[in-house]
Image (tube, rainbow, N blue to C red):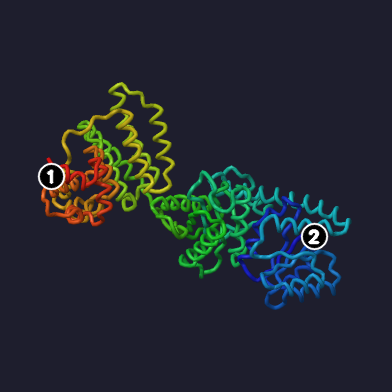
Amino acid sequence: MKVIIADDERIVRIGLKTMIKWEDYGYELVGIAEDGKTALEMSRSLKPDIIITDLKMPKMDGLELLHHLAEQKYRGKVIVLSNYGEFELVREAMKSGASDYLLKVTLKTEDLLEALNKAANDLDQVYENQAENVKLQSAYRQHEENMKNNFLKDLLTGNGDQIENLQSRIEQHQTRCAEGSFFGLYISKTHLDKLEGKINDKDLFSFSIRNITSEMLNEWPGAEIVEIDFSTFMVIIPSHGPNVTEQKQLQVAGNVGRTLELYLNEELVVTVSSQYHGWSQLSEAYRMCREAAALAFYHEKGDPRIIAGFKPYFSVEWHHNNHYQLLAEAKKSLEQMDVLSLEELFQTVCASALKERIHPEQLISFAGNLIDLLLVKGVEEGVTADELSVFIHNKLRESQNVNQLIRNFSDAIETTCKQLDMPERKIWRKEILQVIDYMKHHAHEKITLGQIAREVNLNDSYLSRLFKLETGYNIIHYLNELRMERAVELMKDPNLKMKEIAEQVGIEDPFYFNRLFKKHYKMSPTEYKRCQLNF
């Protein structure tokens, strides 16, 4: 069954267009119109079986469209779309020949399918043979589309040299996307292992990507959308003429990226290439886009990541010049059993990774090599760590961004130390001594973990882990121990009230002070003071 959609709202058109895979249910979406006048013209040329139309549109609304369709003896079915409060319009539409109506705000996939199926079942028996023909034609077109996609995919991924009679294949698939100048958009998901947004079916996700992107590229005739895999697409956009600037290309990428994320609710990266010319440069455009997309590893979540792949970014020099030198430095630290230096070293490398043009794969490889050095110490002591090694390397490779990699690396250090029963350091490092000294002198004040960390120029979470590994204490627990010891000393003064004692140890809330004291000494401050005075 052929279907036309008419609605003046783009988001509604996109929603209806991608809500179902039309061919799977025996329907063929042959046209989309922005107003009733265009829909009427389409109905004359495309001969649709079903028209889905909004009631309120510019140029010609849905009621006028129904009247004109009746005049030309339209034999199909019309389903009208309405909003709340338009019941009079709906009633008039039903009188004028509409077969059903749908509310936009509550529209679901099953509602749309039910209305379509009801309309299709109400049509004359003569249409059954036609529906079967449409299905066969759709399958044939799908086959042709798959053949074209595979052809363009081979050209993009570097297998084009294996294609014989290239020009005849280009003409066979009726594509001219790279005949002259073109640029590419590389669209990829940030989390490649699963779908997390509104669409959980991989085929429907791919279908939606194609349809939404094609809708956004109406002003770029001849553009081709190539599926590399379900989560990765390359859009080849002809750019004939002198007015296509880099700024214009970034604008196109931004519009596509934001619209895709808005509808699909998935985190995406869109990389835009510089301009290339001719079929032979397709693979270079793809390579540059794919490489630049790795920059998203260093970006935070938020607005769609739009990345300019206009020039090479990553360098192989860091791996050759620095990688092994840093590993040698780490090995020396491990000879002194200074495990925490590995974490400091890795954080230092991560902090400069973007500036040093370190590819994420190099960074992950470096993290794995550091862990391997630690595991070697265990092997020397007779500990079997094969399974642990595989687990940790897999965990590091799962990192989706640099911050997650840092967290996974820290967890790997802690896990490995526990597994190998690494000995504790005998001497506390200077930063820990500085922290302890600071807390002793300021325990009577209202201080936070952030203030303590700033005193030694360390990250809050890193200081917490470092303190725990060095001393065996949670840093806040240690601070509270100092405060309770000070409180016990102050209780020797019979003139001090508990509220005053709490304030003098940096705790403004007396109820919190009571709970904390009771947790440490198994009795309330009042009971403790009474026992102390009696003694």
Q: Is residue 188 left or right of residue 440?
A: right
What is the x, y in percent for residue 38? Answer: 72, 72
Residue 466 visible in the shown view: no
Toward which corner of the image does residue 322 lie, by quadrant? Answer: top left
Image quarter of the C terminus: top left
Quarter of image, res 309 = bottom left
Mark 1 — residue? 533
Q: Nearer the viewer, mark 1 or mark 2?
A: 1
Amino acid on which the number 2 mark rests in the picture? Ala
Q: Determine the residue located farthest toward the top in the rendered image.
A: 382
Q: Are marks 1 and 2 in contact (CB under 8 Å)?
A: no
Residue at the limit of the structure toward the front, as seen here = 534
Query: Residue 490, percent across and down?
Result: 13, 49
- Local secondary structure at mark 2: helix
**For the view shown, which residue lies furthest in the bottom direction?**
59
Mark 1 → mark 2, Cα distance in angstroms: 91 Å
Tally of numbered discs: 2
| Foreground of the two, 280 or 202 | 202
Taking depth in this image into account, of 262 and 113 the one nearest to the observer is 113
Q: Residues within 10 Å of mark 2 (few under 14, many from 20)?
A: many
Q: Is residue 495 above or below residue 411?
A: below
Read off the residue under disc 2: 119
Q: What residue is rendered at 68% in x and 77% in y?
A: 58
Q: Which mark is first along the chain, 2 or 1?
A: 2
Q: Dot 1 surroundings within 10 Å: few (below 14), some, or many (20 or more)?
A: few
Expressed as whole percent of the image width and height from the top left, the position of residue 345 reads 26, 42
Residue at point 57% right, 62% down?
238
The answer to whether residue 62 is visible is: yes
Residue 52 to residue 527: above or below: below
The kind of residue tagged 1 is Leu
Q: Is 31 drawn above or below residue 504 in the view shown?
A: below
